[in-house]
Image (cartoon, rainbow, N blue to C red):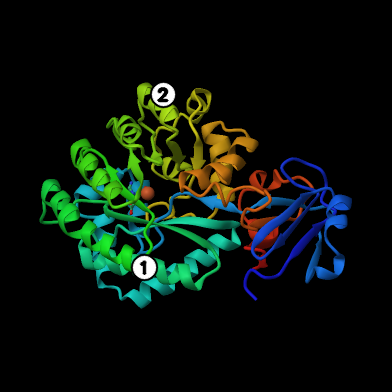
Amino acid sequence: MHGCCPIILDRIPQSIPCPERAAAKDGCIKAVGQADVIRNEFSEASFERIIDCSGKCVLPGLVDAHTHPVWAGDRVHEFAMKLAGASYMEIHQAGGGIHFTVEHTRKATEDELLATLQQRLGRMLRAGSTLVECKSGYGLDLDTELKMLRAIERARRSTDIGISSTYCGAHAVPKGKTATEATDDIINNHLPKLKELKLSGEIHVNNIDVFCEKGVFDLESTRRILQAGKDIGLQINFHGDELHPMKSAELGAELGARAISHLEEVSDEGIVAMARAKCAAVLLPTTAYMLRLKQPQARKMLEEGVIVALGSDFNPNAYCFSMPMVMHLACVNMKMSMNEALAAATINAAYALGKSDTHGSLEVGKQGDLLIINSSRWEHLIYQFGGHEALINYVIVKGKVI
Ligand code: NIG
Ligand code: FE
């Protein structure tokens, strides 16, 4: 039965952050610690299943703080264009990029979107992600945005992976509208409808997102949309300072944003403001890699005390499901240590989603989301580049072996 199978993970080598033994019950972690101490607390007979983890490691389930997993069509042809030298914004301004995906997503039915979403979430789960943020944002009009959010809601109810859902109706300015018209439409039509659906319990939406970028939504439109989202109870979690310095970080800090993603072009003042405001930086190494962007200054952020998280940014531009690969890129390209990358892909990513009280670490009372790694050194999860499904013996969500 879902979440009801208590689990003991036995004989785990003592290597931080792997507890020797952890027990999960009713979906939550009941105990973490030395085998003999736990053995005294629980009678063996009360456990439905005991997993022998000799020679293995136990880690918290990975948390992916930024994904766009609901869309139709793909953009493999654009990957070829980018390899030939076209920039992301050139393709976008010529009507491709997000606009291409919007065209295809508008035509897809909710069931079709749900089916591909479930497959993608399954791949994320197999790569070790147990909680993922999922954005809308390829509809731009109200009906399609709601279709995407409904697909996310249905996936949330029907799949094991945890979901934090994000309304991202300001992902691009729809064709035929100005940014001001799109901003007004979002504030006057989209958000009131979302509020109604949220209140009725029909759709759970957790976060609001805007693509704050030159040629997309400027700082003022971004401010208006994010503030209106906050006013209906959404956490602010948006795309900023990616391709151009926009002062997105300063704005996010001022508005009390929970997190800002990308930040390749963040200013020094923005970094300090984010540290002070405890606004998480969600760094996306796949995008910086694929678009050959300047790398975000992870080291500077860490030194200034910013809460640094990681996300896959899975989307038709950055087609990567795998947080282990994201951690690898963060270490090699952004100079993070393996410990920093793991914290960024677990507890800090949970913080970026407002879920660090319940997710992101192996602590008593938190949700029993864990991975059992087929190696006595957990670092293999980062060191090995690809093929992680073979390295991850078990993915466990709410105490249930998936
Ligand atoms: O985070 N930068 C904006 N949004 C996405 C890309 C979306 C797309 O190109 O479809 C990102 O990289
Ligand atoms: Fe994104």
Q: In the rendered image, which residue does mark 1 sit on? A: 201
Eyeballing the image, is 323 above or below 256? below
Q: In the rendered image, which residue does mark 2 sit on? A: 272
Can you tell me whether the CB of the residue at mark 1 lies under 8 Å from the nearest atom of ligand 2? no
What amino acid is found at the position of numbered circle 1 in the picture?
Gly
What amino acid is found at the position of numbered circle 2 in the picture?
Val
Determine the secondary structure under disc 2: helix
Residue 124, quarter of picture: bottom right
Q: CA distance from mark 1 to mark 2?
A: 38 Å
Q: Say few, some or many: other residues with alpha carbon within 10 Å of mark 1 (under 14 / 14 to 19 / 20 or more).
A: few
What residue sits 66% from the left and 67% below the top?
400
What residue sits 32% from the left and 49% below the top?
209
Image location of residue 205, percent across then percent down: 36, 59
Q: Nearer the viewer, residue 50 or 181?
A: 50
Which quadrant holds the C terminus? bottom right
Image location of residue 38, percent across then percent down: 83, 54
Q: Nearer the viewer, residue 388 or 148?
A: 148
Q: Is residue 69 left or right of residue 27?
A: left
Q: Say few, some or many: other residues with alpha carbon within 10 Å of mark 2 (under 14 / 14 to 19 / 20 or more).
A: some
Determine the secondary structure under disc 1: loop
Image location of residue 267, percent across then percent down: 35, 25
Q: Nearer the viewer, residue 104 or 221?
A: 221
Sequence-wise, the earlier of marks 1 and 2 is 1
Eyeballing the image, is 241 above or below 398? above
From the viewer's perspective, is the residue at label 1 or at label 2 nearer? Answer: 1
In this rendering, does residue 148 appear at all? no
